[in-house]
Image (cartoon, rainbow, N blue to C red):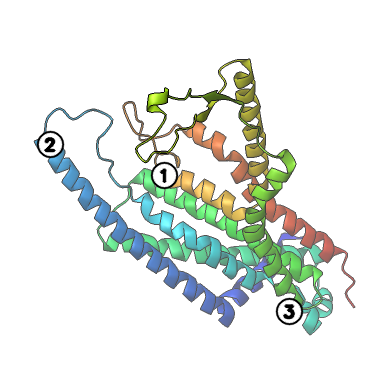
């Protein structure tokens, strides 16, 4: 593989994407939805800011306010939380639309054979097509973020350097998530005979990992670990009243009441240990299953990036508005790793298949 051939293919694919009617239409819808999400987020932010100012004005007029219960100032980053929800759906649609016919279209038009007659290697073709698609996706996400930033300035909302850094990091995470679906579409385009089958396979995989896998995760975990341990109890019977008190107001006979009360001995301690081990094992299986869901990984990472406290709200005395970076990294490193590995795995499958493809 030579860099010149790679960049030539990538440049051609990038230009083809930008001039494609399909890409322009989907990009326009993507940007419109981004603008709508930003407008909704800005309205929400302004409403919360007004309530915050009212609370602060009331607090300054009073004395003896307990520490730890001060009103929390809304963050500009909260505006992008709403935008992150539409990224998982419309970003995936944009990525699949860009990748499902990258190779299958060349098969149908039989242009791959003529392309290989030029001084270009096979790996330059597949790598160049992937690079061109990635650049087009970066272009789409970059435009969405630029428009979002322009809207912030239009409403006189100016983020500080820390918020700008987090917004840029949010863009990188969004690109990683969308690259997963682009690599899936590129893989199906490589292994499919035509574009029709390619988009069907891509949509099936998209629905499987985005919808069916999260729905079935809890069921699989319950099948693996079984039912939770039962709580040990003993029966305590309230003695019946005296004969003079044995009748209620309606004349009925009052019967002894049996109440189940948890055991307080070693059996109860054993139950607590078994219950703790059960839920830890089930939580581990749930986490392993949901790590296979790109949208779950994306939401976990974007929530940590766009939240001052790393996605965990804490109140009361000793509350820290900023969560330590190490704590956040320890909580989301698996999600970040999954967002990086998934595109590599699907692209590797497409790469191996394309290199072994019989082109006649």
Return the mark for residue 60: 2
- Residue 102 appears in the picture as rendered: no
Judge the density around disc 3: few (<14), some (14-19), many (≥20) Cα neighbours within 10 Å.
Answer: some
Residue 314 percent location from the top left of the image: 38, 35
Q: Nearer the viewer, residue 22 or 50?
A: 50
Q: Earlier in the sequence, mark 1 or mark 3?
A: 3
Query: Is disc 1 placed on a helix, strand or loop?
Result: loop
Q: Position of residue 208 (x, y in %)?
A: 68, 61
Please determine whether, in this image, residue 115 is positioned above or below residue 336: below
Q: Which residue is mark 3?
A: 196
SS of the residue at dot 3? helix
Q: Foreground: 117 or 291?
A: 291
Task: Work out how far the residue at label 2 is from the one at label 1, CA to CA, in angstroms.
Answer: 27 Å
The residue located at (64%, 32%) in the rendering is 230
Relative horizontal placement of residue 113, taking residue 295 as reference (left or right):
right
Picture coordinates of residue 212 (x, y %)? 66, 59
Q: Nearer the viewer, mark 3 or mark 2?
A: 2
Quick one: quadrant of the C terminus? bottom right
Spatial CA distance of label 1 from label 3 is 41 Å
In this rendering, position of residue 57 left or right of residue 15: left
How many callouts does the rendering have? 3
**Residue picked out by circle 1:** 307
The residue at 79%/59% (across/down) is: 349
Whole-percent x and y of residue 259? 51, 29
Residue 22 appears anywhere in the view: yes
Q: Is residue 154 left or right of residue 108?
A: left
- Secondary structure under tag 2 reads helix
**Which residue lies most toward the left here?**
61
Which quarter of the picture shows residue 281?
Answer: top right
Sequence-wise, which precedes: disc 2 or disc 1? 2
Q: Residue 260 or 120: which is nearer the viewer?
A: 260
- Identity of the residue drawn at 27% across and 63% down: 154
């Amino acid at each position: 593989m030579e860099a010149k051939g790679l960049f030539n293919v990538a440049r051609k694919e990038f230009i083809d994407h930008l001039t494609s009617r399909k890409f322009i239409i989907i990009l326009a819808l993507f940007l419109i939805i981004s603008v709508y999400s930003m407008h909704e987020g800005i309205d929400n932010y302004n409403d919360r800011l007004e309530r915050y100012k009212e609370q602060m004005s009331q607090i300054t007029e009073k004395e003896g306010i307990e520490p730890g219960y001060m009103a929390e100032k809304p963050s500009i980053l909260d505006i992008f939380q709403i935008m992150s929800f539409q990224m998982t759906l419309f970003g995936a649609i944009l990525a699949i639309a860009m990748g499902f016919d990258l190779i299958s279209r060349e098969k149908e038009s039989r242009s791959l054979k003529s392309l290989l007659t030029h001084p270009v290697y096979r790996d330059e073709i597949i790598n160049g097509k992937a690079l061109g698609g990635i650049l087009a996706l970066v272009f789409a996400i970059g435009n969405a973020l630029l428009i979002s930033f322009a809207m912030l300035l239009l409403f006189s909302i100016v983020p500080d350097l820390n918020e700008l850094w987090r917004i840029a990091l949010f863009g990188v995470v969004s690109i990683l998530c969308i690259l997963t679906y682009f690599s899936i579409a590129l893989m199906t385009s490589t292994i499919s005979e035509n574009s029709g089958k390619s988009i069907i396979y891509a949509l099936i995989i998209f629905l499987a990992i985005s919808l069916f896998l999260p729905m079935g995760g809890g069921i699989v975990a319950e099948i693996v670990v079984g039912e939770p341990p039962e709580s040990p109890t003993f029966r305590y019977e309230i003695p019946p009243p005296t004969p003079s008190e044995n009748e209620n107001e309606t004349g009925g006979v009052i019967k002894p009441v049996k109440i189940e009360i948890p055991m307080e001995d070693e059996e109860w301690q054993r139950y607590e240990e078994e219950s703790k081990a059960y839920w830890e094992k089930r939580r581990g299986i749930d986490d392993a299953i949901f790590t296979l869901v790109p949208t779950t990984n994306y939401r976990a990472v974007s929530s940590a990036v766009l939240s001052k406290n790393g996605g965990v709200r804490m109140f009361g005395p000793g509350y820290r508005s900023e969560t330590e970076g190490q704590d956040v990294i320890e909580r989301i490193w698996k999600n970040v790793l999954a967002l990086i590995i998934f595109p590599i795995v699907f692209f590797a499958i497409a790469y191996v298949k394309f290199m072994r493809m019989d082109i006649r």
